[in-house]
Image (cartoon, helix red, strand yellow):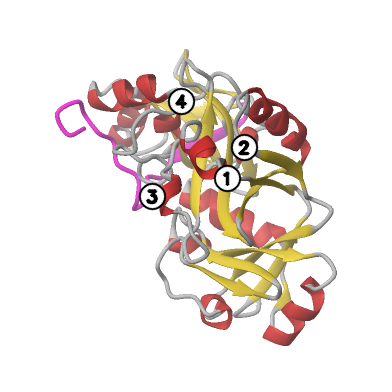
Amino acid sequence: MSDTTAILLKNRGVLAVSGGDAREFLQGLVSNDLNRVSPAQAVHAALLTPQGRYLHDFFIVEKGGRFLLDCEVERCDDLLKRLKIYTMRSEVELAEVSSDYVVVLFMGKDAGKKLGLSETPGQATAFGGGVAYGDPRLSELGARALLPCNKAEAALEDAGFARGEIEDYERLRLELGVPDGSRDMEVEKALLLENGFNELHSVDWDKGCYMGQELTARTKHRGLVKKRLMPVAVNGPLPAPGTPVMLDESEVGTVKSGLDTCALALLRLEAIESAQAQGGAALTAGEARLTPQQPHWMKFETAEEA
C-alpha cells in the first residue's frame, strides 16, 4: 500500500440539511453536539429511536451554509424519511445529494498533511471544491472527504494520492474494533454504548435532550452495559455474520463483519472475562475459535466510573 492512498466509497451517500433552523433541527435529534460543527470541524453522530435504540449513524460536516451527512447509501432513503417526520413547521430543507458528491477515504501517514489537516480528530478544511476532515472517532482511521463528483479525480491526482483498496481500510477498521453502521449494529436493537460510541466521541453528554437521550444516559450512569462489540482474532474459517458465539454450551454473542482472520463480535462482558482468564481459547463460532482483542481506546466502565 502506498504511503498515501484514496479510496472512493461507493457504499456511502450524502444528505443535505439546510435552512434557518437546520442546526437547531439536528441538535434536537442526534447524539452529538451540532454547535461543534463548522467549516473547520466535523462530528460523528447517531439517530436513535425514542427508546434509545440505533437507527442510523453518519458524519456531519458544514459547507456552503448547509450540513452534509455522510451516511450509508443503501439506507439514505430511510434516513431522509425519518428526518422529514420531525421537520413540521421548521425552516428546514432536506435533500439527497449523493449524485453530486463522492465520499472519499484517505489512508497513510502523510494523508492528513496532503489535505492540510493536523492529527486532531474531526478537523475540517476546504479541499478539491468540497470538504476534507480527519475521522472524528479515531485519528488512526485516517481522513475523509466529500468531493464534487466532477472534480474528485482531478483533486486526488493533483494532491498526489494513489488509488487504494477498500480491503486495506476494512482490516484497519476491524483491528481497531470500529463498527460499520448497520453491518455491525442491528437497527432498532443496538445500544450506542455497546458499540463504543462514548469512547469514539460520537455522544455528547452535556448538549441536552435529543431523540433517545434518556436511555443512553441511564445506560451510562447506571453501568448497564452488559455486552460490547470488539475485535476477535479468528483461528479457522471466517464465520458468517450472524453466527452465534459459544462459550462451552452457552451462546454468549454474535459475529458481525469480518475479513480474513479478523472479525467483530458482540460479546457478553462475562464471556470476554472468561475467555481472557482461559488464555483466549474458550470462544467458538462455527468451526473457528475466537480470541477477543481489546483495542487501546476501548474501556469497560462500571456504574461508579461512569
Mark 4 neighbour class, 10 Å CA radius: few under 14, some 14 to 19, many 20 or more: many
Q: Earlier in the sequence, mark 1 or mark 2?
A: 1
Mark 3 neighbour class, 10 Å CA radius: few under 14, some 14 to 19, many 20 or more: few
Q: Find residue 122 and report its horizontal and vertical position in percent.
A: 46, 60
Circle on res. 191: 4
- Against 39, residue 10 (above or below) is above
Magenta span: 286-306
> Which amino acid type is shown beneath numbered disc 3?
Pro
> Which amino acid type is shown beneath numbered disc 1?
Gly
Q: Please, what secondary structure does the residue beneath circle 4 have?
A: loop
> Which amino acid type is shown beneath numbered disc 2?
Glu
In this rendering, which labeled residue sits more in front, label 3 or label 4? 4
Circle on res. 91: 2
In this rendering, which labeled residue sits more in front, label 1 or label 4? 1
Write down the residue under mark 3. Answer: 295
Mark 2 neighbour class, 10 Å CA radius: few under 14, some 14 to 19, many 20 or more: few
